[in-house]
Image: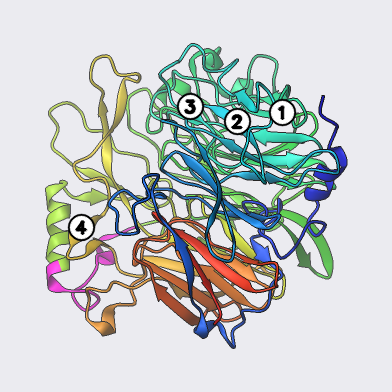
């Protein structure tokens, strides 16, 4: 029988008690601030950063030039804790590495099963229980490993494994079901979400659950799609929960240990693009939900997108910060969403701290579908990404090249023209035999911001967010016989961009990607900077910004690190001004949030997963 670790887990859930020079959780700590107190690397010396080591060999021992690399396709945020660096790979393994050299200390093989996409959870243990690494697998298991040896922990579940599919997925043996992000820790519990199919509403329930860290036994369950008698049940058609598998909680949760709250970002409902079969507001889809972390009971919720028909998940970890207004400190949770909007919510009530209004939005013309009449808009801050398009927004040759403009004009003509009615433009209906005309939605399904989330600079009070402007194209038409819904989205081209030498270029005017600092005390932009370059353009035109998915981190020395853009750059910027102070060209895209940590001798490193290689930098 394992001994309770309540005290140690409570300490870990409180920022500041564990080793601050580590990066022991997905967002550095469980508040999701992505802030490190390290200062050795500063604005004065960051330009001297050099490559320290990189890890990118596959299970066969091939070198870095192998076509089948260890980390290919992963979005993992490594964890640095207890003297070791931990990361999953896309080669069905989880590894522990020496933080100074990248040398493997242990490797846990998962066989043919995929490793977690975005990282693992570290629990520091206590005097009776050694530290553990917990990870979710692609076949729906939660595994606990000894952090020093990589061996399964026999006292947890069945010899170190809990089957997450039990109770939710047995009827759907072929449906995808797994954890989308690392679990969150609270007082002897690990809280897990689920990710599965998004296009078919008939699938496993995407419940959020808490498990006893001692035994692996289920403690509580929260139904993201409410059942009879539960709050929110009336926002769906009767008995919808029986066949409706989503919405999913696939983003990372954050924890307020003092208040005993866990904050969940919850994804869109299925089917993604047709809402006729799920009339209603559809709680708790596309919402931030605050639960009592000990019981799983709903304290409050805030829905970012009502009756979502755009794939506008709430997927980024909500950031827990204190907002100072009129000399008063307000505990806040900050939600950033795919529609490019940011909401500052009171942590106790879920009410918007800054003025907010429900505005009328364009309505659907699809048979049997009714858009929700309004959507929430914060008065502050302004939208972080493009939310509308008109013909004058088409890129010009002065901004890029005549060839690019011609390609974009041909794209529009090929798609029958494009129409956009502003924020939350519904997908237009194309009847059988009708001529082609495409709806253009900004932001597209990849969002203004995505799962990378925000970083909070405690020195300036700025909240930092990376955003992109990539529009989505398409329409809704009658689905083929046998489809799970009667109508579904179709398109000739999925996104409002064209293939040019070296990559895809969006068709609206730049910037196409930005890094924005929001003054949390006023709700105003402190600064905004174009993020990313288009190398194939003439030098004077290259500063276009590039699409992003992952997010930034910030350090106490006033540095922002981000590597998300598809120009394959890893950058450092001055947190006060947004001025770029260092840049390194990566071999592949850094499509993950970076981390920073110090080794046992106090030397600071900065690390990022660049598609298939863990790349680590330090000062000479």
Q: Kindly give the residue lying farthest to the bottom in the view shown.
A: 44
Q: Circle 3 — which element?
A: loop
Q: Circle 2 — which element?
A: strand
What x and y, as percent, mark residue 130? 76, 42
> Which residue lies under the disc numbered 3?
139
**Which segment did they paint magenta?**
389-403
State yes or no: residue 401 in magenta: yes
Q: Quick check: 133 above or below 450?
A: above
What x and y, as percent, mark residue 386? 41, 60
Of the image marks 1 and 3, the number of the one nearer the N terminus: 3
Spatial CA distance of label 1 from label 3 is: 18 Å
Lateral position of residue 581 relative to residue 158, left or right: left
Q: Circle 4 — which element?
A: strand
CB atoms at circles 1 and 2 under 8 Å apart? yes
> Which residue lies under the disc numbered 1?
211
Spatial CA distance of label 3 from label 2 is: 9 Å
Lateral position of residue 152 relative to residue 539, left or right: right
Lateral position of residue 444 relative to residue 458, left or right: left
Lateral position of residue 321 relative to residue 475, left or right: right
> Which residue lies under the disc numbered 4?
498
What x and y, as percent, mark residue 459? 72, 75
């Amino acid at each position: 029988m394992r001994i309770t670790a309540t005290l140690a887990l409570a300490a870990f859930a409180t920022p500041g008690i564990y080793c601050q020079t580590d990066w022991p959780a997905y967002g550095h700590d469980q508040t999701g601030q992505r802030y490190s107190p390290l200062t050795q690397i500063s604005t004065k010396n960051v330009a001297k950063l050099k490559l320290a080591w990189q890890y990118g060999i596959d299970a066969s021992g091939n070198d870095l030039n192998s076509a089948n690399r260890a980390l290919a396709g992963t979005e993992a945020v490594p964890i640095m804790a207890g003297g070791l660096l931990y990361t999953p790979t896309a080669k069905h393994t989880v590894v522990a590495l020496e933080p100074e050299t990248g040398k493997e200390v242990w490797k846990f093989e998962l066989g043919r099963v995929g490793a977690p996409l975005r990282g693992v959870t570290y629990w520091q243990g206590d005097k009776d229980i050694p530290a553990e690494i917990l990870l979710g697998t692609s076949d729906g298991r939660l595994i606990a490993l000894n952090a020093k040896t990589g061996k399964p922990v026999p006292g947890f579940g069945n010899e170190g494994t809990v089957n997450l599919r039990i109770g939710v997925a047995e009827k759907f043996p072929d449906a995808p079901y797994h954890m989308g992000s690392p679990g969150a820790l609270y007082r002897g519990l690990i809280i897990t979400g689920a990710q599965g199919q998004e296009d078919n509403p008939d699938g496993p329930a995407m419940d959020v659950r808490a498990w006893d860290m001692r035994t692996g036994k289920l403690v509580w369950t929260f139904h993201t799609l409410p059942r009879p008698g539960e709050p929110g049940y009336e926002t769906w058609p009767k008995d919808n929960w029986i066949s409706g598998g989503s919405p999913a909680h696939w983003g990372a949760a954050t924890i307020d240990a003092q208040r005993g709250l866990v904050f969940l970002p919850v994804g869109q409902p299925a089917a993604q693009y047709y809402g006729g079969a799920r009339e209603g507001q559809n709680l708790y889809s596309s919402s931030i939900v605050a639960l009592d972390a000990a019981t799983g009971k709903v304290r409050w919720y805030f829905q970012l997108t009502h009756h979502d028909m755009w794939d506008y998940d709430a997927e980024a970890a909500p950031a827990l910060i204190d907002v100072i207004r009129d000399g008063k400190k307000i505990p806040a949770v900050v939600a950033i969403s795919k529609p490019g909007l940011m909401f500052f919510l009171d942590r106790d009530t879920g009410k918007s701290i800054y003025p907010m209004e429900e505005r009328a939005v364009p309505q659907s013309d699809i048979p049997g579908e009714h858009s929700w009449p309004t959507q929430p808009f914060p008065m502050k801050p302004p939208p972080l990404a493009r939310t509308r398009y008109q013909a004058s927004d088409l890129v010009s040759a002065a901004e890029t090249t005549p060839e690019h403009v011609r390609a974009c004009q041909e794209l529009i003509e090929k798609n029958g023209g494009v129409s956009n009615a502003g924020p939350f433009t519904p997908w237009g209906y194309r009847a059988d035999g009708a001529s082609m005309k495409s709806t253009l939605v900004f932001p597209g399904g990849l969002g203004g911001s995505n799962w990378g989330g925000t970083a909070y600079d405690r020195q300036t009070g700025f909240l930092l967010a990376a955003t992109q402007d990539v529009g989505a194209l398409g329409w809704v038409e009658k689905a083929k016989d046998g489809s799970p819904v009667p109508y579904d989205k179709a398109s000739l081209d999925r996104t409002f961009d064209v293939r040019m030498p070296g990559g895809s270029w969006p068709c609206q005017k730049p910037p196409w990607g930005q890094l924005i600092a929001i003054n949390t005390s006023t709700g105003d932009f402190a600064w905004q900077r174009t993020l990313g370059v288009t190398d194939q353009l003439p030098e004077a035109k290259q500063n276009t910004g590039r699409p992003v998915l992952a997010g930034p981190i910030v350090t106490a020395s006033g540095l922002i690190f981000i590597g998300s853009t598809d120009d394959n750059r890893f950058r450092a910027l001055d947190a006060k001004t947004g001025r770029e102070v260092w840049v390194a060209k990566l071999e592949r895209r850094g499509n993950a949030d970076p981390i920073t940590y110090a080794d046992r001798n106090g030397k600071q490193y900065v690390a990022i997963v660049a598609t298939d290689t863990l790349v680590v930098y330090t000062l000479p």
